[in-house]
């Protein structure tokens, strides 16, 4: 019992020893910094390049989009530091339509068009580098754009190609550009004099919408620029029977040439 009491007394009387009797701190990361002769990190210091790489860039732009729609998307690098390079790519149901100017060294703008397929998507990818040439950071960023809504309404661009020949005038068009609901077509032939605007001929002829061709034997080419013939193709949708028949004009396309009468009897 005396031995135990003496042992406890010696422990209480001895100086506390932790391996750091010289006053060094031994608490976790601060100890490591203290041993290295460095100060603890300051939470108010700006983030390092590595930390900025986590969230400094972003791709901004509309999503979702409608099928067939085109929009611009911006890669914002203004928070990343000096901008070195960037490459855009696209995958999925879309195409790149162009690269546009943004703020120098801070923004890149890309145009992207969605395909006509509804309920699809495309992914924009930007691979970029920033920082100093000898100390740069490179990474990639993606943005997924959803495509929703019905496909775009198909449009038809009806146009005439008019050619005056020595014995006739040929008028052609692309039957694929005729509205599918058209079931009646007619061609207007109007011959005027440019000197006074008077009308020499003005007639209508029924034509086959799907034929893609009309031949006017009543006119021929001329070297003068006095007589001018205008051809106008009109397409209609006719429904019902008389007297309640409905006739709706769908399309109208015109074209003209300098021409003179070739065979009045054919008119």
Image: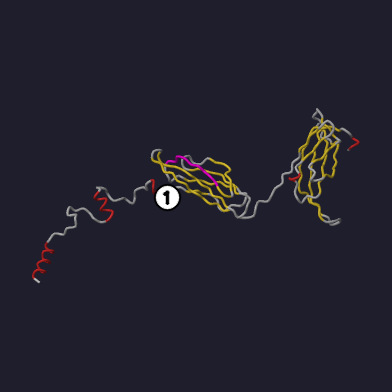
Count of numbered tags: 1
Q: Nearer the viewer, residue 123 or 188?
A: 123
Any magenta on residue 18? Answer: no
Residue lying farthest to the right in this orientation: 265
Side of 122 where 266 appears, left or right: right
Side of 3 where 256 appears, left or right: right
Residue 87 position (above or below residue 149): above
* Residue 116 horizontal/vertical position (percent): 63, 50
* Residue 113 horizontal/vertical position (percent): 59, 47
**Residue 133 is drawn in which quadrant?**
top left
SS for dot 1: loop
Residue topped by disc 1:
54
Q: What residue span does the magenta drawing correspond to?
A: 82-90
Residue 21 position (above or below residue 264): below
Residue lying farthest to the left in this orientation: 2
Identify the residue shown where x is 83% and y is 56%. 240
Any magenta on residue 84? Answer: yes
Q: Quadrant of the C terminus?
A: top right
- Please tell me how crowded label 1 is: few (under 14), some (14-19), or many (20+) other residues with Cα within 10 Å: few
Identify the residue shown where x is 62% and y is 54%. 118
Residue lying farthest to the bottom in this orientation: 1
Side of 88 where 152 appears, left or right: right
Q: Quadrant of the N terminus?
A: bottom left
Colour scheme of the picture:
secondary structure
* Residue 62 horizontal/vertical position (percent): 55, 51
Residue 36 position (above or below residue 229): below
* Residue 39 horizontal/vertical position (percent): 27, 49
Q: Main secondary structure of the magenta part?
A: strand
Q: Nearer the viewer, residue 78 or 5?
A: 5
Q: Nearer the viewer, residue 243 or 119?
A: 119
**Residue 168 is drawn in which quadrant?**
top right
């Amino acid at each position: 019992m005396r031995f135990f009491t003496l042992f406890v007394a010696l422990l209480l009387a001895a100086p506390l020893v932790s391996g750091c009797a010289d006053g060094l701190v031994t608490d976790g990361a601060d100890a490591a910094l203290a041993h290295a002769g460095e100060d603890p990190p300051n939470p108010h210091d700006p983030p390092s390049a590595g930390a900025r790489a986590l969230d400094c860039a972003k791709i901004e732009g509309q999503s979702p989009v409608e099928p067939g729609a085109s929009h611009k998307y911006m890669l914002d690098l203004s928070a990343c530091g000096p901008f070195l390079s960037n490459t855009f790519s696209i995958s999925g149901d879309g195409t790149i339509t162009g690269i546009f100017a943004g703020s120098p060294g801070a923004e890149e703008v890309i145009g992207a068009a969605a395909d006509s397929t509804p309920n699809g998507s495309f992914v924009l990818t930007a691979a970029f580098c920033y920082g100093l040439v000898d100390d740069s950071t490179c990474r990639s960023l993606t943005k997924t754009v959803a495509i929703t809504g019905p496909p775009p309404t198909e449009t038809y661009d009806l146009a005439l190609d008019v050619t005056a020949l020595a014995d006739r005038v040929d008028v052609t068009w692309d039957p694929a550009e005729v509205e599918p609901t058209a079931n009646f077509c007619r061609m207007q032939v109007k011959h005027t004099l440019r000197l006074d605007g008077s009308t020499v001929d003005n007639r209508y002829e029924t034509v086959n919408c799907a034929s893609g061709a009309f031949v006017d034997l009543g006119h021929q080419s001329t070297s003068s620029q006095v007589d001018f013939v205008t051809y106008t193709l009109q397409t209609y949708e006719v429904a019902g029977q008389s007297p309640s028949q409905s006739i709706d004009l769908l399309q109208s396309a015109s074209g003209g040439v300098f021409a003179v009468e070739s065979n009045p009897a054919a008119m």
